[in-house]
Amino acid sequence: MTVCIIGASMTEFGRRDAWIRGLLAEAGSDCLDSSEVAPEAVEHLLVSNMASGEFEGQTGIMNALAHDLGLHPAYAERVDQTSASGGAGVYSAWQSIASGASEMTLLVGGERMTHRSTAEATDVIASITHPVEYKHGLTLPSFAGLTARRYLHQYDAPRESLARVAVKNHANGTDNPHAQFRKEITIEEAMESPIVADPLRLYDFCPITDGSAALLFCSEEVAKSYTDEYVRIAGVSGATDTHVVHERDDPTTMGGVRESSKQAYERSGYDPDDVDIAELHDMFTILEFLQFEDLGFAEKGRAWKAIEDGRTERDGDLPVNTSGGLKSKGHPLGASGVAQVYELVQQLLGAAGPRQVGAEVGLACNVGGFGNCVTTTIVEGP
Amino acid sequence: MTVCIIGASMTEFGRRDAWIRGLLAEAGSDCLDSSEVAPEAVEHLLVSNMASGEFEGQTGIMNALAHDLGLHPAYAERVDQTSASGGAGVYSAWQSIASGASEMTLLVGGERMTHRSTAEATDVIASITHPVEYKHGLTLPSFAGLTARRYLHQYDAPRESLARVAVKNHANGTDNPHAQFRKEITIEEAMESPIVADPLRLYDFCPITDGSAALLFCSEEVAKSYTDEYVRIAGVSGATDTHVVHERDDPTTMGGVRESSKQAYERSGYDPDDVDIAELHDMFTILEFLQFEDLGFAEKGRAWKAIEDGRTERDGDLPVNTSGGLKSKGHPLGASGVAQVYELVQQLLGAAGPRQVGAEVGLACNVGGFGNCVTTTIVEGP
């Protein structure tokens, strides 16, 4: 059975004066309204969210959302795969339709984070990884710094190539009305911003963000009864890497990206050359390099060159993060993987406005932890 | 495709000197070992858990468990449906196999709670329900008290009939080596225990518990390549009721139980008369009455009579909670729905020892919140 996406929405990302339930309801109701699907038609509701209990003292948010959207008696479930909760939600939604469990599944991903201090938020986020590492201060930003240093050394890459990722994604974000940062930055600004985890600086990191995004899934038969404007999920899968990051043979290789994309390519029948556009998980600029390589878009150690050559710009042969990416659009944990696919849907349906590129096949890669579990989704246009 | 369960395990339930990761790994490795399935064969790992972040400050436990069991690169995901997380895990595992996403899915449900004070634990649990209610003190035990009072009045049921649920389930628990309480109680003890939420008393409530349980799922074709000792999932589904409990037309009716079981019966081809044994979510004794009725085992208002008549005893026509139920076995939130199906597997395979009854079809009903979302699973023997 071919599973399709017939609706997509996202809220404004950034510092929002709304609690998690409000954010989820905003994206969810926009998605139903814009696709003209009645709440009664929804059989499964999935909520991608990592930590509403820790961030906001509120659990059971999937049942609350079923209430807020009038979906009762639809089944409701929360899906957590840390920062890849959104991608895991896409994979779960696909399974719900492909298995016949549900005829119509609404996925809403979201997180509210900015009301907590950066220290409080990063304390929750640090607990994603193995205690043997985070208790020694090896949080996600530290891994990123260590990995970036290794990458630059091992592949003789210039430091500026990382800054180029930030500059490109900020430029794309200026054209995204939902993005948290809608301002261009220069290579010089990125290179001179404060050091966070040497050699990475402030502009190498995504922000802390509130926001939500939603997608509506059904079979192609059902999709056709609603609209001609839908995209197909060609392939989706997920895979873990070692939970202890220092056990990996090569710190510049993301095993979860390789394995999940291998399976997604196999299921789709596509290979890396067929992909026209990609949304990658640029929580840190270095991650855009690693995913670009481990997804098969460049040889190992050559992503920096592809980016310097402009291949991933909007006028390049493989535009990456036309949405602005996590870097500029923001990273509300549970929403990000859903918002990646939202951008692909806009692009494949020709609805991306000033960000529009020509694309028939799109790929989203959503990374949990420091690649501890990764999902890859490949979608194709109508 | 028929989805089967080829392995089942559970840890001792109770006050455990182990963290959540240890509990999950204990059940998970027992399940793999006893079914002689190699870790490499597992393609999906699902972890049913409500609140490891809130209870223990540890997130990403599904990735940690993939590490601890050597499952990498299997896909990993956490499934949360509050106190019905285990049943939601069974439903998700079924979808993973039936959709073709996974050939072999390991589900491990668990929670660690006893290291927190009762006030801390119930604070987390209270946040399951709608703030409009819990902020006024309407926690789950208060709902139970109000509902019990209404039920006794509306159906002219004796208070002792509730005590009988506790006495029966404690008696069953004495024969379950995994149960938290392995001691019989009398009607008099139950009737004279301290009032918690009038008319309900201490022995009408399940305890706070640490523990874990696991199940291993695959297609029947794959199952046969491993063993003859497996059970089939005949039907499984889930459904929400209103999130605001006071919006329900009749507080003694659980809409989520009715809707989820209606779908599970339809999918299985069975009806209530075909069910030989049931594990019900007796977080409060009154809930065993309500589920017994809304699952179609007795007319509305007559469950108390069925229980007084001994129908649900081990020698009755429909034994309920031969495991001891949540009341006696304990209720580690994420584990409970998994442990319910564990008991059915033991019974259907004739491996329940002194608890053994004759059964070919079993049903498990797992309740999230105060029926805010419910899953029903029907399994059949080999």
Image: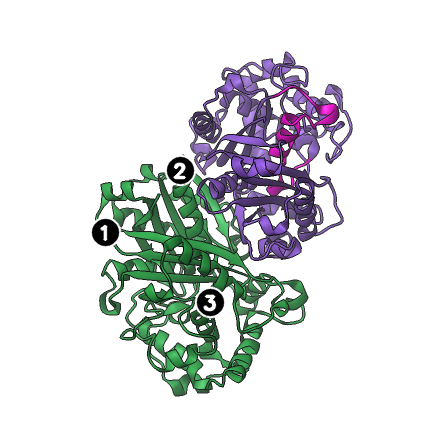
Chain colours: A purple, B green
Residue segment shown in magenta: A330-359
Above or below B104: residue B141: below
Q: Going by the image, does B163 lie left or right of B80?
A: left
Badge number at residue B229: 1
Q: Position of residue A327 (x, y in %)?
A: 67, 31
Residue lying at the far right of the rendered structure: A183
Badge number at residue B100: 2
Residue lying at the far top of the rendered structure: A309
What residue is pinned by disc 3? Answer: B208
Above or below A269: residue A45: below
Q: What residue is shown at x 65% (from left), y 26% (from top)? A: A347
Q: Going by the image, does A309 lie left or right of B220?
A: right
Q: What amino acid type should be assigned to the residue bearing mark 2?
A: Gly
CA gap, disc 1 and disc 3: 33 Å
Q: What residue is shown at x 35% (from left), y 53% (from top)? A: B234
Q: Chain of mark 1?
A: B
